[in-house]
Image (spheres, grey):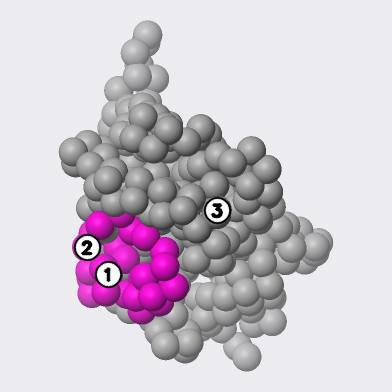
Amino acid sequence: MEAKVKRLGILTGGGDAPGLNAVIRAVAKVAESAGAELYGFLDGYSGLIRGNYRKMEKRDISGLLHRGGTMLGTNNRDNPFNFPVQEGDEVVYKDMSDAALENLEKLRIDRLVVIGGDGSLAIARELTRKGAKIIGVPKTIDNDMQGTDQTFGFDTAVTTATEALDKLHTTAESHHRVMVLELMGRYAGWIALYSGVAGGADVILIPEIPWKMEKVAEKILSRQKEGKPFSIIVVAEGAKTPEGEKIIRETIKGSGDPVRLGGISYRIADMVEKVTGFESRATILGHVQRGGSPSPFDRILATRYGEAAGMLALAGEYGKMVSLRNGIITWVAFEDIPQGCRTVPPDHQLIKAARNIGISFGD
């Protein structure tokens, strides 16, 4: 295959996710087979703005498939349109998008592959409007991106969370406790729903379904009557309290997504103890969900995404995001990707199945 373009760039933006290296590897192999060069920008959009990059050689991609994280580095702060610049003793935020475009031109990058979540790809869309020629690859463990059926990293996160639930089950049963496991997902309940079902949770609380403490207590007490004096509750970090309060751990200035959720599990554990009398413990699984080697499914999905992104870029296409639709890899134009978070439909088939086997959603 002879490429229409001869020089590609690639960067990873936003939070890390298992499978990023697999995408990089696939793009690199496609570029190599076409005789094209590949340049990796370091630490997300920061590398593009500052001109920090490395030319990707064959040896750089050896052994990448099974590795978590990203060999290029990433961050979720450095937005080219609102970039922190030190001026004297203070940091000011400036539009540095022109500098990003100048570096692409200086390196003669024909097409740039951006691997990222909704924030990173929103930036990619804006840079495309300014003249950059970008192909996007959807990435997030939260599985909350519009325009695709599934993102890589999600399956691995669900596997990690399910393994944690398996371990919590034994200690919950031994001590006759209620164990509350808080999982990532931002404002969507995908990880909590899938791992909750896979891990045998008794209650699953997600942002999409308002819940009441009395309904949760009802489930716990009914299990006690059945001779099961312990329960497992899975809660998504974005789930609100029964009063509608969102639990925010901290706010990060300058971040594309400044709100850091966390702590709802402790609130629930306290409520469970007060209402049911059961000793309760809360566990926040946290960033371990982002780490580790990608699952076989995520390695395959990331490879398929990377191959498709590389082929589109080499064919001279741009302004598109590769996408999984009904098991088929396709693409969607940046401008056609719906805005907002892809949340769990309350009538989702897995929710219906979970209800039918006795899992409570607190409603």
Task: Give the overall secondary structure of the magenta segment.
Answer: loop
Q: Report the front residue among 78 and 239.
A: 239
Asked whether disc 1 touches disc 2, contact meaning CB atoms under 8 Å apart, the reply is: no
Residue visible at 40% across and 84% down?
325
Q: CA distance from mark 1 to mark 2?
A: 16 Å
Magenta residue span: 335-363
Q: CA distance from mark 2 to mark 3?
A: 44 Å
Q: Residues within 10 Å of mark 2 (few under 14, many from 20)?
A: few
Q: Amino acid at mark 3?
A: Lys
Q: Amino acid at mark 2?
A: Gln
Q: Which residue is mark 1?
A: 345
Measured as percent of width and height from the top left, residue 158 is found at 55, 61
Q: Which residue is mark 2?
A: 339
> Can the viewer see residue 327 in this picture?
yes
**Front of the two marks 1 and 2:** 1
Q: Secondary structure at mark 3?
A: loop
Q: Which residue is mark 3?
A: 228
